[in-house]
Image (spheres, helix red, strand yellow):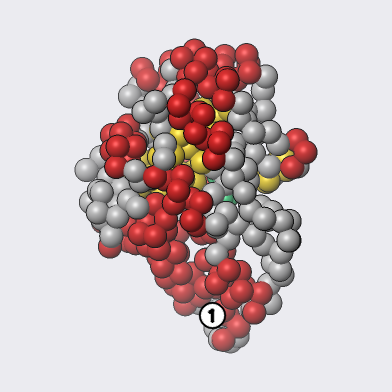
Amino acid sequence: MPLVTSKEMFQKAYEGGYAIGAFNVNNMEIIQGITEAAKEVNAPLILQVSAGARKYAKHTYLMKLVEAAIEDTGLPICLHLDHGENFDICKACIDGGFTSVMIDGSHHSFEKNIEVTRQVVEYAHAHGVVVEGELGRLAGVEDDVNVSAEDSSYTDPEQVEEFVKATGVDSLAIAIGTSHGAFKFKPGQKPQLRFDILDEVSRRLPGFPIVLHGASSVIPEYVNLINANGGALEDAIGIPEDMLRQAARLSVCKINIDSDLRLAMTAGVRSYLTANPAHFDPRQYLKPGRELIHELVKNKIVNVLGSDGKA
Ligand code: G3H
Ligand code: 13P
Ligand code: ZN
């Protein structure tokens, strides 16, 4: 089976009240951990690649690894560019075989965001590729750019119809209180998402797929394993799983997860090396990292996304 776009996945997810997991990938062990878990529970997948991941692993390696995962699992997989910052990187990914790109114009003015997004949509659609746009600005760390809570802003529902109509995007990422990274709320702060904004956006865009970035739950089990094995992530806090489950039942069709994968991998590697300080074969310590990613992704699909059995 070739790579697929997210078009049909989103349509079924919207109608079925579940969401597709969009997992960030950087290397073979991460791709295997995710895709083998999805295979076990028969879930469709979006694998996404950031500019940093493309720089780290090279476009060709990631492309071939994802093709290998499709051959190995037979799953419908969409390969997506995460946070494309301009037309050139989106074009490079479209030309290089990706089936979906995000143009992140959220740091621009509304007018400029429409202009750059529309340019990407025109090129992408002419090549059979779908496009995610973004309105509103998340806090947290993205590709070495740190957006402070003060500089973040919720999506203004009054802008969404004009944005979608003027750009032709296939899905829209919105800001309702999620943020990138492992420190989403301050200690003692009650995690909250603006479901009122999501409701108003959905009312204005009936049937249209919404995307949530910064949606890791920062699973305490993995944070505790890291901290028990020499790590220092005491104040890590994420989005409660019940809120994500609720969003998946509504119009949210794509839920982005990266930090939870990083934490699972690091927890596996750190605990292995603490228990086996004389070992130095990467296969030995990467294997438990891959196993924890497998466990994490399976739990997400079954308990949070609801995409099991939908491949
Ligand atoms: O939203 C950002 C993703 O977690 C990707 O992170 O740019 O460090 O690869 P990265
Ligand atoms: P997290 O940092 O919450 O995993 O978010 C990832 C993300 O939004 C990738 O685009
Ligand atoms: Zn993101």
What amino acid does circle 1 point to? Tyr
Q: In the picture shown, does residue 209 fall above or below 275?
A: above
Number of disc labels:
1
Q: On the picture, is 242 further left or further right than 130? A: right
Residue drawn at point x = 67 percent, y = 23 percent: 108
Q: Nearer the viewer, residue 298 or 210?
A: 210
Residue drawn at point x = 44 percent, y = 24 percent: 205
Q: In the picture shown, does residue 72 fall above or below 256?
A: below
Q: Is residue 239 visible?
A: yes
Q: Is residue 64 visible?
A: no
Q: Nearer the viewer, residue 210 or 266?
A: 210
Residue drawn at point x = 67 percent, y = 62 percent: 236
Mark 1 nearby-residue class (10 Å; few <14, some 14–19, many ≥20): some
Question: Which quadrant of the view contains residue 34?
Answer: bottom left
Residue 58 is situated, as x and y percent measured from the top left of the image, at: 50, 45
Residue 238 is situated, as x and y percent measured from the top left of the image, at: 60, 57
Residue 99 is situated, as x and y percent measured from the top left of the image, at: 37, 33
Q: Circle 1 sits on which residue?
A: 272
Residue 50 is situated, as x and y percent measured from the top left of the image, at: 54, 42
Residue drawn at point x = 73 percent, y = 61 percent: 188
Q: Nearer the viewer, residue 94 or 232?
A: 232
Q: On the picture, is 140 further left or further right than 116? A: right
Q: In the picture shown, does residue 203 fall above or below 41?
A: above
Which quadrant of the rendered structure holds the N terminus?
Answer: top left
Q: Nearer the viewer, residue 114 or 176?
A: 176
